[in-house]
Amino acid sequence: MAQHLTAVKAVMTVSRAEVRGATIGSTELFFSPRGVKAGAYSFDIGTAGSVCLVIQTLLPALLFAGGHSTVRLTGGTHAPWSPSFDYLHDVFLPVLGRIGISVRATIESYGFYPRGGGIIRVEVEPVEKISPLVALDRGELYSLSGRSAVGGLPVSIADRQTRAFLDTLTGMMSGERVPISISVDSVLSRGEGTFLFVRPESEHGAAGFCALGAKGKRAEEVGGEAARLFMEYYSTGAAIDPHLADQVVQYLLLAQGESTFTTSSITDHLRTNLWVMSFFLPFESEVVEDPGRLGKIIIRTPYQMR
């Protein structure tokens, strides 16, 4: 698909790779990099494909490019089946910061399906050392914050999303009380779209959840969906959310020390990422799953393999 092709061409550019099969619909890809080069890059997906997926493709390479890099990406900032910019900025990048990776991201405009046109800018610093991640439990939940936003639509829709989120959450938390702060925004975008993003702030955990609006999808559905996504995580007591688990493991395979964390669900993406990386890096991993509850992941690199 377009976002996958842009990701391939982007990492081809930064690594000066020889590539065959880089076409829409291709089922085979030959990729032979010649060496990563730091610099200033700009890529346009041309659709509402996810800019966040493209930057996540580039990051592992640019971290070892030996210098500062900037990347400007145009496409979808809040697209289905991908991390939103809010998730990238408020959850994923702060966790990378915890393990020694410095990446900053800003947004110039928002891009929704189907028009896209959102623009983000990412600055990447070269990494010297990656530390392990240890997060076995969420600990105390201090607060829940987030944003309910619209682009090109009445802000009253964002208000309805927020009310639905609060009403649904109140019914599901059974009297538990936690400070909640949801801002209501109207954002600059080329097309129309809505989203509600929430992030729990806790003692040891890291998580975020985003529900997107769509044509024919009522604001109340968006708010209720965000609340249910949060509760699926919260009810397990796990430290990190399931999508963060599959996004962070490739960096932990390069860490100096044993990483161990719990997640609210073991995804096929997580298992696939570990399997693919086993062809490239020496490591040991254990995935312990408690059906219906949480999963525990242990990663040992050559520094402390048994």
Image (cartoon, rainbow, N blue to C red):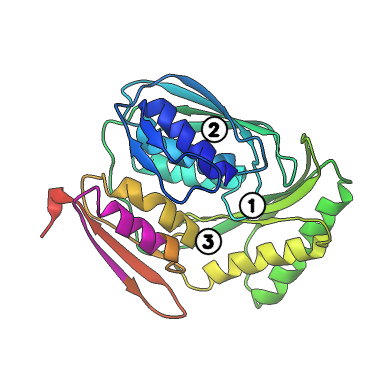
Quadrant housing the C terminus: bottom left
Residue 289 left/right relative to 303: right
What separation in Å lies between label 1 and label 2 (alpha carbons)? Answer: 19 Å
Which residue type carries mark 1?
Ser
Q: Where is residue 161 in the image (x, y as percent from the top left)?
A: 79, 58
Residue 78 or residue 220, whichever sits in front: 78
Answer whether residue 202 is magenta in the image: no
Q: Is residue 86 visible?
A: yes
Element marked by disc 3:
strand
- Reading the image, the residue beneath label 2 is 105
The residue at the point 85 percent across, 53 percent down is: 157
In the picture, measured across the screen, residue 1 lies left or right of residue 156, that is left
Q: Name the residue under label 3.
A: 141
Q: Does the magenta stretch include residue 283?
A: yes
User: What range is drawn magenta here?
Assistant: 270-287
Disc 3: CA contacts within 10 A as few (<14), some (14-19) or many (>=20) = some
Instruction: Using the rendered image of the protein, determine whether residue 165 is visible from the camera's viewpoint.
Output: no
Tag 1 near tag 2, CB within 8 Å: no
Could you tell me the amino acid type at mark 3?
Leu
Q: Judge whether 118 appears above or below 154 on screen.
A: above
Q: Where is residue 243 in the image (x, y as percent from the top left)?
A: 49, 58
Which residue in the protein does label 1 denote? Answer: 145
Q: In this view, does 202 lie above or below 87?
A: below
Specify the amino acid type for callout 2. Ala
Q: Residues within 10 Å of mark 1 (few under 14, many from 20)?
A: some
Of marks 1 and 2, which one's residue comes earlier in the chain? 2
Classed neighbour count for the residue bearing mark 2: other residues with Cα under 10 Å, few (<14), some (14–19), many (≥20): some
State the CA–CA distance, disc 2 to disc 3. 26 Å
